[in-house]
Image (tube, rainbow, N blue to C red):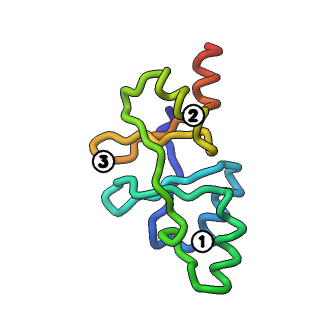
Amino acid sequence: MRRELTFLSPSDPIEGMSRILEEHGIDALPVVDRLGRLVGAVVREDLPQARAEARESGRSKVRDWMQAPVTVGPKASLRLLCQILTQEPTHLAFVVENERLVGVVAALDVVRYLAG
């Protein structure tokens, strides 16, 4: 699990989402509120449509593009993680404890762990 996270707030502009996803080469970003609670996620595959609609319709905030995040608890089993990570298009799950985002696990993290 990675604990050092880049995240967005619902009121951040789409341009910031786009820049971070592209600069870091990641497929999804968590969206957290002022209290650090995970309220959604944005994904790379929405970028082209988000950019176009931001220009045309004004849907220019992260909140306009959030979707329900895939979450697990900090004590999730390796088996559960493998099931989730192989089924999710982004191949990652956000780790939440007491409603707060505490980390993220990607499929590559599991592979590295198993490789020892």
As drawn, 59 above or below 113? below
Q: Nearer the viewer, residue 50 or 30?
A: 50
As measured in the structure, the alpha-carbon distance from the residue carrying label 1 to the one carrying label 3 is 25 Å
Badge number at residue 99: 3
Say few, some or many: other residues with alpha carbon within 10 Å of mark 1 (under 14 / 14 to 19 / 20 or more): many
Q: Secondary structure at mark 1?
A: helix
Where is residue 63? Give x, y as percent: 48, 69
Query: Would residue 79 appear left or right of 115 to someone viewing this image?
Result: left
Where is residue 71? Give x, y as percent: 43, 42
Q: Nearer the viewer, residue 7 or 108?
A: 108
Q: Residue furthest top?
A: 116
Q: Are marks 1 and 3 in contact (CB under 8 Å)?
A: no
As measured in the structure, the alpha-carbon distance from the residue carrying label 2 to the one carrying label 1 is 26 Å
Say few, some or many: other residues with alpha carbon within 10 Å of mark 3 (under 14 / 14 to 19 / 20 or more): few
Q: Which residue is mark 1?
A: 14
Where is residue 23? Give x, y as percent: 70, 56
As measured in the structure, the alpha-carbon distance from the residue carrying label 2 to the one carrying label 3 is 21 Å
Q: Secondary structure at mark 3?
A: loop
Q: Which residue is mark 2?
A: 85
Quarter of the figure that contains the C terminus: top right
Q: Nearer the viewer, residue 91 or 29?
A: 91
Q: Are marks 2 and 1 in contact (CB under 8 Å)?
A: no
Q: Residue furthest left?
A: 98
Badge number at residue 76: none
Q: Residue at x 33, y 47 (%)?
A: 100
Of marks 2 and 3, the one in the foreground = 2
Q: Earlier in the sequence, mark 2 or mark 3?
A: 2
- Three-letter amino acid code at the position of disc 2: Leu
